[in-house]
Structure formats: C-alpha cells, structure tokens
Image (cartoon, helix red, strand yellow):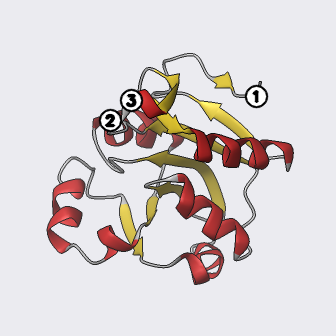
Amino acid sequence: MTLVWTRIDHKLIHGQVSVAWVPFLGVETIVISDEDTAEDLWAQKVMTMGLSPEVKMAYFSKPANLAGLLEKLSGQRILLLFKNLAGVFEALSLGLNLKSINLGNQIGLKPEQEVCLADTFFINRHDLAALATLHLAGLEIIVQSVPASKAVRWNPR
C-alpha cells in the first residue's frame, strides 16, 4: 500500500481535492472513512462527478477494518479522507498507522467557541487538545489547503 496523503476535510471531495491534490499526488484510489457518506449513495455520486473516471473510490463506514482495506489496495497510490478528527482518532485506536495528517477544511458552526488554525480550518478547544496529543505522539500535523499553498507544520503552543 502507498498511502500518499491523509486529510481531514469536512467537505471530503470537492475542487481542492479533485483538481489540486489528486493530480499533484498521482492518486489512483480515494478512501473515505465516514459512516454517513458510506451510507449516502447520492453524496457519493455528487462527490465523484468532479473526479477523473480513472480514480477509484472506496467508502468505509467504520474504521475497524480500514488498515486491512488499505493493505488490500497494495501498490495503489491512496488518498485517505476523514470528515473530522474523531474519525482519525478512532482509526488510530484500531491500529491504523499514520505518520502525518493534513488539515484541509473544517468550518465550524460556532466561531466564537473555536480556534482558527488556518483560513479554512477551525477547531474547538477539545479537538485542539486532541490534536496536540496526536502531535506529541509523533504524528506530523500539516496545515495546507492546496499543494500550491505553503505547508505549515502545526505545533501546539
């Protein structure tokens, strides 16, 4: 398996992903780990509309067997997408081994209760502490919306 990028993005697949990240990384398969999306055929159809037909898709409702699925896709260049940080924590707790994670887009509903990490990434204080835990455990946290923008390695303050 070649996991080329792991990203948190509440929109999952949209222009930044399909037009910028997929060609930049040479992605062959996108794996989405999100229960709601795995059960929503309409959302899946809409998300794939902007993708090249050569890009394969896999939807995962529960990350329990995510590591096994990624191993089955051996040899393919994989982009792994999570809708939120909770999905990342669940996958890690179930044995998924990640080296880094890209914070793409997460726009909150209550800006007064959230911290802005980038123009397009807001996080509540609880998740901020969880992100710091991931960083201290050795996971590299990269804030970058598209490949053309500057990558910023996040460190807890």
Residue for point 85% across, 50% down: 137
Depth check: give the residue in front, 152 or 15: 152
Residue for point 28% across, 42% down: 14
Extreme-front residue of the structure: 112
Residue 55: give x, y in percent of width and height. Answer: 36, 58
**Mark 3 vs 1, N-terminal side:** 3
**Mark 3 vs 2, N-terminal side:** 2
Residue wearing tag 2: 19
* Callout 1 secondary element: loop
User: Count the marks: how many?
Assistant: 3
Q: Is residue 150 above or below residue 72?
A: above
Mark 1: few/some/many CA within 10 Å (<14, 14-19, 20+): few
**Mark 1 vs 2, N-terminal side:** 2
Residue 80 bears which disc, if any? none
Q: Quadrant of residue 91?
A: bottom right
Residue wearing tag 3: 111
